[in-house]
């Protein structure tokens, strides 16, 4: 593999858009250090008057903006070549700045919460403070769940303990556990790892995918009591915090940050249950197409339509994304041209480069997109996905002040998925070859299965596990696995739940960030609704307005601008309908090829 300095600069980021030279970065770094040292002088001044609140917040955000640029310059360098000692040193120093900043502004939230609420709200009514209404409003919203000062201090001392369950899980899962080798197609031993399990389980060879599941899940079974105790510790901690902060339950506590009512969570589960008949039909089609007498949950990942030679070189990928997103209008297209020609995208793999793909918005500059493009159709989808994030960042940064530009995780995956859905629709609109159409549809159906159904199954499991603990049922390997087994039987009715599949809950890292994964399902459903609306009406104006909201409002309110109301079950039900329609077409195509 090529070293970074052997790569063609044409396909690489241009860091000079952030800082002209390394010296300029050093100078900004020194300025940040000096500025951060002065921040503590604002402690004790915030409540005095609207002017002093504004002065304090203006300074904090100005320093934060400068510091973020310094940090991202280092972080992006590091991700382009993680092995470079110079970049490692830059990144390390940039992280020191963040720590210093966080320490310096630790007074901010407690001080605002100690002010008289009516007084702060009256300050925020003044036009000069309008930009801080959302941010400070969020701090004030937390007041209802604040405790007296001494109790808050005790909770602060416990904060390190809070992450223990996750740490233990990570050590056990990613460091201590190893897996027995696989026997590949040619009878040779090959390693089985967390990284390649996903490849083995997609194997067209039933023997291989079954062996992968048996060996992978089998290892989790060996330690299942430790995983159960670790997860139980996490559930107990969630419940403790929910109780002391006077939430009705841990789900309500977790959703409070995004200001999402529990009803949204539960109505997702309900709406997905209504789509389970279609899932059952999909599994039946899958079983027949794979020529199996019995479909096991181990047979869910292999493609139904065998691999096609759908090579998509980078130039073609760029064109595809541009054509697919044409319904978003000329402004969006012009931005894509800028992304392509102005070095927003670091395209190909080099030694030491961060794997996978991401988009990173840089306020006041432009987004930076990292890819490891290998000329596959999947890579074209990744390009569409990351550019969705990138344009969301760009529009937000242009429309919002720095204070409000950053969007919340709940809306983030909407922008990326809209582009993926548009790409799917575009490909289906131009592709006439039946086998290729079936292949594209198969990918889309799998997105529904893995993003809506599977994540909702997880979300429902989290709800059940926390409820079990609250109602006095001990959380053990047996009770957790039985609950998980029942959900598998419900979601994958018609398939045989593989013997070890009931232990799958043990390997999901997201469970240590409770009630998080439902957002994948709501985000995907929202994106399907938005993309359909744009396609049918040719009008993307509401969606573009949504992209410009950044973090200026709560996610559910922002989504309403794009025409999506997650407080009603319609969005998820609509996604279930689209899934059913695609399945009908897929079934028909399978008969014809
Ligand atoms: Zn994403």
Image (tube, rainbow, N blue to C red):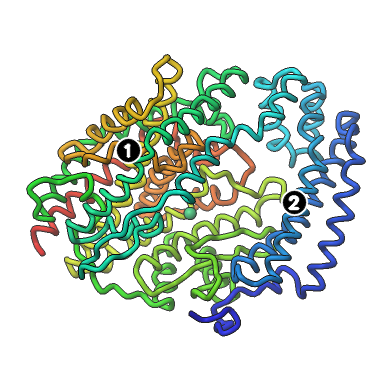
Q: Residue furthest top?
A: 472
Q: Which residue is mark 1?
A: 503
x%, y% of residue 307?
Answer: 23, 67
289 sits left or right of 26 in the view: left
x%, y% of residue 247?
Answer: 56, 19
- Label 2: how many Cα within 10 Å (few below 14, some 14–19, many 20+): some
x%, y% of residue 355?
Answer: 49, 65
Disc 2 C-beta below 8 A from ligand 1: no
Would you identify the image quadrant in which residue 183 lies?
Answer: bottom left
Kindly check if marks 1 and 2 are in contact, taking CB atoms under 8 A apart as contact. no
Q: Which residue is mark 2?
A: 98
CA distance for labels 1 and 2: 39 Å
284 sits left or right of 571 in the view: left
Q: Secondary structure at mark 2?
A: helix
x%, y% of residue 113?
Answer: 77, 26
562 sits left or right of 215 in the view: right
Instruction: Return the residue nearer the eye: 185 or 93.
Output: 185
Q: Residue at x 48, y 79 (%)?
A: 1
Mark positioned earlier in the residue sequence (1 or 2): 2
Mark 1 or 2, closer to the camera: 1
Instruction: Return the residue nearer the eye: 55 or 124.
Output: 55
Quarter of the image containing the C terminus? bottom left
Q: Residue at x 49, y 75 (%)?
A: 348
Q: Secondary structure at mark 1?
A: helix
Q: Residue at x 28, y 46 (%)?
A: 578
């Amino acid at each position: 593999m090529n070293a970074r300095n052997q790569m063609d600069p044409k396909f690489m980021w241009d860091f000079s858009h952030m800082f002209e030279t390394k010296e300029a970065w050093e100078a900004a770094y020194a300025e940040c250090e000096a500025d951060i040292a002065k921040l503590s002088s604002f402690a004790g001044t915030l409540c005095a008057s609207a002017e002093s609140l504004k002065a304090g917040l203006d300074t904090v955000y100005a320093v934060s903006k400068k510091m973020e640029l310094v940090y991202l310059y280092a972080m992006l360098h590091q991700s382009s070549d993680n092995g470079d000692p110079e970049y490692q040193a830059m990144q390390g120093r940039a992280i020191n700045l963040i720590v210093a900043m966080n320490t310096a502004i630790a007074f901010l939230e407690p001080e605002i919460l100690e002010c008289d609420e009516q007084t702060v709200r009256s300050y925020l009514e003044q036009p000069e403070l309008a930009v801080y209404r959302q941010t400070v409003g969020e701090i004030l919203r937390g007041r209802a769940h604040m405790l007296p000062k001494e109790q808050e201090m005790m909770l602060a001392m416990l904060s390190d303990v809070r992450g223990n369950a996750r740490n233990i899980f990570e050590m056990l899962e990613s460091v201590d556990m190893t897996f027995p080798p696989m026997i590949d197609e040619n009878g040779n031993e090959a390693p089985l790892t967390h990284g390649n399990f996903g490849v083995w389980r997609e194997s067209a060879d039933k023997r291989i995918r079954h062996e992968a599941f048996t060996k992978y899940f089998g290892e989790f079974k060996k330690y299942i009591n430790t995983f159960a105790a670790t997860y139980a510790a996490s559930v107990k901690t969630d419940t403790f915090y929910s109780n002391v902060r006077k939430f009705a339950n841990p789900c309500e506590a977790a959703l409070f940050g995004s200001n999402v009512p529990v009803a949204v969570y539960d109505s997702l589960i309900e709406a997905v249950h209504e789509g389970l008949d279609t899932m059952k039909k999909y599994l039946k089609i899958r079983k027949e197409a794979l020529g199996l007498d019995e479909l096991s949950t181990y047979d869910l990942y292999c493609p139904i339509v065998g691999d096609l030679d759908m090579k998509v070189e980078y130039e073609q990928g760029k064109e595809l994304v541009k054509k697919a997103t044409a319904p978003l209008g000329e402004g969006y297209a012009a931005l894509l041209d800028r992304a392509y020609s102005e070095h927003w995208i670091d395209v190909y793999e080099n030694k030491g480069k961060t794997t996978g793909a991401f988009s990173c918005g840089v306020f006041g500059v432009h987004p930076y997109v990292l890819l490891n493009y290998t000329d596959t159709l999947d890579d074209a989808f990744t390009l569409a996905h990351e550019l969705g994030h990138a344009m969301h960042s760009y529009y937000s940064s242009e429309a919002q002040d720095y204070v409000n530009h950053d969007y919340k995780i709940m809306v983030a995956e909407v922008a990326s998925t809209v582009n993926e859905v548009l790409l799917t629709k575009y490909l289906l609109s131009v592709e006439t070859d039946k086998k290729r159409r079936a292949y594209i549809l198969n990918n889309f159906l799998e997105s529904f299965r893995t993003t809506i159904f599977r994540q909702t199954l997880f979300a429902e499991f989290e709800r059940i596990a926390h409820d079990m603990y609250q109602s006095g049922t001990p959380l053990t390997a047996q009770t957790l696995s039985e609950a998980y087994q029942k959900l598998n039987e419900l979601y994958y009715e018609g398939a045989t739940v593989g013997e070890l599949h009931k232990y799958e809950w043990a390997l999901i890292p997201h469970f240590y960030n409770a009630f998080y994964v439902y957002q994948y399902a709501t985000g995907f459903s929202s994106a399907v609704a938005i993309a359909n609306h744009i396609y049918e009406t040719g009008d993307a104006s509401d969606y573009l307005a949504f992209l410009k909201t950044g973090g200026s409002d709560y996610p559910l309110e922002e989504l309403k601008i794009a025409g999506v109301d997650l407080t009603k079950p319609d969005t998820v039900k609509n996604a279930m309908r689209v899934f059913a329609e695609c399945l009908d077409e897929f079934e028909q195509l399978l008969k014809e090829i």
